[in-house]
Amino acid sequence: MIDLTYTEKKDTRSGFGDGLTELGRTNPNVVALCADLIGSLKMDQFIKENPERFFQIGIAEANMMGIAAGLTIGGKIPFTGTFAEFSTARVYDQIRQSIAYSNKNVKIAASHAGLTLGEDGATHQTLEDIGLMKMLPGMVVINPCDYNQTKAATLAAAEYEGPVYLRFGRPAVPVFTPADQKFEIGKGILMNEGTDVTIVATGHLVWESLVAAAELEKEGISCEVINIHTIKPLDEEIILNSVKKTGKIVTAEEHNILGGLGESVARVLAQKLPTKQAFVAVNDKFGESGTPSDLMKKYGIDSTAVIEKVKSLL
C-alpha cells in the first residue's frame, strides 16, 4: 500500500525562508538580497536577525543579480529572492554573463514558480524557467517537492560551491518527506517501488504522482515513483535502473513540455535505453489567473492527468 499520510500542509517557500534563517545562524558568509518581495520569499526572520547581511534592491532584478555576483568575490554566499519569472527570463543576460559564465557562487531562490502561484496570472507564472536555467553551463537546477525538502535543499545549496537555481512555490501542499533529511544534489529518491510503469516527477507533481499511483494500485497497476528534485545534474542511474524493470515511463512536472524534466529524461533514454514515454506537463501554453487546483486540472498536470498518461502506455 502506498502511504499517503502527511503531517500538515505548508508552502515550499516557507521551507526556503526557514532554511535561510538557519543559515543566518550557522554560516556568517550567507547574505540575502531581495527585489521588493520580502514577505513572499519568507525572508523576514533572516532580516530581523541579520539586518546588516540583507540588501533590499527594490524592483531592479538585473541590478540584484549583478550585486550578488560581486558579493561572491569577497567570499559571501548570496541568496537572491524574487518570483521565478523575474529570477530567470527578466534577468537572463545578467545570470549568463555575470554569474554562470564566471561560475559565481550565487544561489538564485525563485518562488511562485509554475501555474500554482494562481491568481497573479500569466505574466507571473513562469513555465519556461527550468529550460532556461538547465541550458546554462555549470548551473545546478533544483525543484523540491515539499516544505521539508525545500528547507534541506536551501542548506545544501549553501554548502555547494557554484551557481544554483532553487525553484519553489506559493501554495500550501502536503509535507510528506522527512524533517531531518540530508539533501543530496543530483540524487533522485525512490518514493514507491513498482513493476509496471515508472513515474518520474519533480516539485509539486511528486505528491500528485503518489496520489495517482495509489489510485492505480487499486486497479492492479503497479507504479514506481521517483522524486527527481534535481533536474541538473540529472540522476540518470535511478531512471535507467527503473525503466530496465518497467519498460515504460511517465514524466510529470509543473512546466512547459518543451525544455523541462521530460525532455532531459527523453535525451537520456534516447542515448542509453530507448523507452516508451508519456509527458505530464503544460502543453506549450501560457498560464492564466485561477486557483492552483483549478489550473492544475485545466492544464493537465494533476493526479488525474498522471493516471491518464500511465494508462496510455499500458
Image (tube, rainbow, N blue to C red):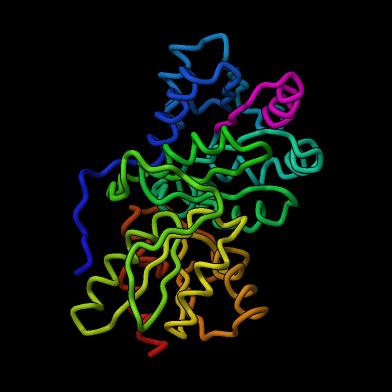
Relative image position of residue 299 (x, y in whole percent) = 42, 67
Indicate whether residue 188 is drawn in magenta. Answer: no
Relative image position of residue 91 (x, y in whole percent) = 70, 40
Identified at 58% across, 27% down, the residue is 35
Q: Which of the pair 123/239 is nearer the observer? A: 239
Relative image position of residue 115 (x, y in whole percent) = 44, 55
Q: Quadrant of residue 295?
A: bottom left
In the rendered image, which quarter contains the C terminus?
A: bottom left
The answer to whether residue 67 is above or below residue 91 is above
Q: How many marks?
A: 0
Indicate whether residue 80 is drawn in magenta. Answer: yes
The answer to whether residue 246 is above or below residue 178 is below
The answer to whether residue 28 is above or below residue 266 is above
- The residue at the far bottom in this view is 314
Identified at 50% across, 28% down, the residue is 37
Q: Quadrant of residue 307?
A: bottom left
In the rendered image, which quarter contains the N terminus?
A: bottom left
Identified at 63% across, 58% down, the residue is 131
Side of 122 where 303 appears, left or right: left
Identified at 35% across, 45% down, the residue is 171
The answer to whether residue 23 is above or below residue 216 is above
In magenta, the rendered stretch is 64-81
Relative image position of residue 63 (x, y in whole percent) = 71, 27
